[in-house]
Amino acid sequence: MAFQAPRCGHEAGELKSAVIDIFANFSFQITLYLVLLYINSATIEQALKAGGSIVIFLIISDRPYGIFLNGCRKLFGVDSN
């Protein structure tokens, strides 16, 4: 009999999903946002203030957005892996 790693519980899976959603959306959105600020000639101070405010918004909204995307994937039969 081969060794099998223990499976994560439901809570660990949810935490992993939340962390992945936050990282994926955050890494894309903050980069895009800062590039747009740079294109529009924002100063460093303006970019830091705006970037700081969007960080709070993204952390709050990332998991609900990830849940929404998973629902859309299921609705349209797209594999989420």
Image: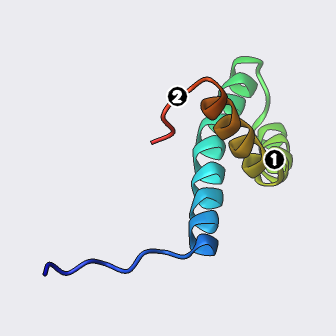
Between 1 and 49, the residue placed more toward the observer is 1
- For the point 70% across and 18% down, the residue is 39
Query: Residue placed farthest to the left in the image?
Result: 1
On screen, 5 above or below 67? below
Precedes in sequence: disc 1 or disc 2:
1
| Residue 78 drawn at (x, y percent) | 52, 28
Other residues around mark 2 within 10 Å, as few (<14) / some (14–19) / many (≥20):
few
Disc 1 vs disc 2: which is toward the camera?
Answer: 2
Quadrant containing the C terminus is top left
On screen, 50 above or below 11? above
Relative horizontal placement of residue 60, taking residue 25 as reference (left or right): right
The circle on residue 61 is 1
Q: Quadrant of residue 14?
A: bottom right
- For the point 68% across and 30% down, the residue is 72
- For the point 48% across and 34% down, the residue is 79
Residue bearing mark 2: 78
